[in-house]
Image (cartoon, rainbow, N blue to C red):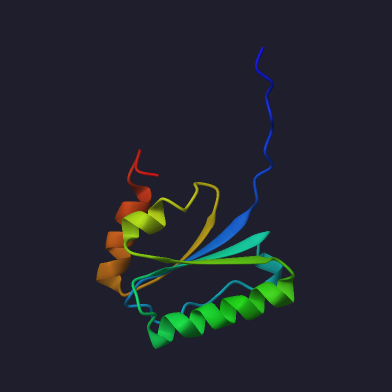
Amino acid sequence: MIPTVAIPTKRRTVVVLGRSARGATLPSVAEVRDTILVLAIGWPLTDTQRGVLDRAEELARTARVVLDAHLVSSAAAAAALVGSEDRLVLDAGSWEARRIRRRLSAPGER
């Protein structure tokens, strides 16, 4: 018999920042989950992406939760890091936001 190990899942607030990010409104301290994960698409960071990342860092410090941040190359790379139970905050212009949402909701690609 193979032993089963239950791995507790962390409840995450995931902030996806597109190249056309406009300065997302982050959740309040009371709404923040156990971890804030920031996924910034593209390199280098835009000034807006940097601003949201800085605010997310301050929010994590205030809420006393873990902050995890990743630079990713594409919406597909971001989708690979987003789970179905995550609370999603998406910051991108309308065209890019549609493309990212499509990628995040694509079945079997996460």
Residue 89: x, y in percent? 48, 66
Q: Between 67 and 25, which is closer to the camera in this rendering?
A: 67
**Going 66% across and 72% down the picture, which residue do you hit?**
60
- Which quarter shows the C terminus? top left
**Going 65% across and 51% down the picture, which residue do you hit?**
10
Residue 38: x, y in percent? 51, 67
Task: Judge from the rendering whether residue 31 lies leftward or rightward of residue 81; answer left or right.
Answer: right
- Which quarter shows the N terminus? top right
Task: Judge from the rendering whether residue 34 lies leftward or rightward of residue 36; answer left or right.
Answer: right
Tell me if residue 54 comes above or below residue 109 in the rendering: below
Tell me if residue 88 comes above or below residue 56 in the rendering: above
Task: Judge from the rendering whether residue 4 lies leftward or rightward of residue 51; answer left or right.
Answer: right
**Going 29% across and 62% down the picture, which residue do you hit?**
98
Q: Between 40 and 14, which is closer to the camera in this rendering?
A: 40
Query: How many numbered discs?
Result: 0
Q: Residue furthest top?
A: 1
Tell me if residue 34 comes above or below residue 29 in the rendering: above
Residue 87: x, y in percent? 54, 58
Quarter location, residue 9: top right
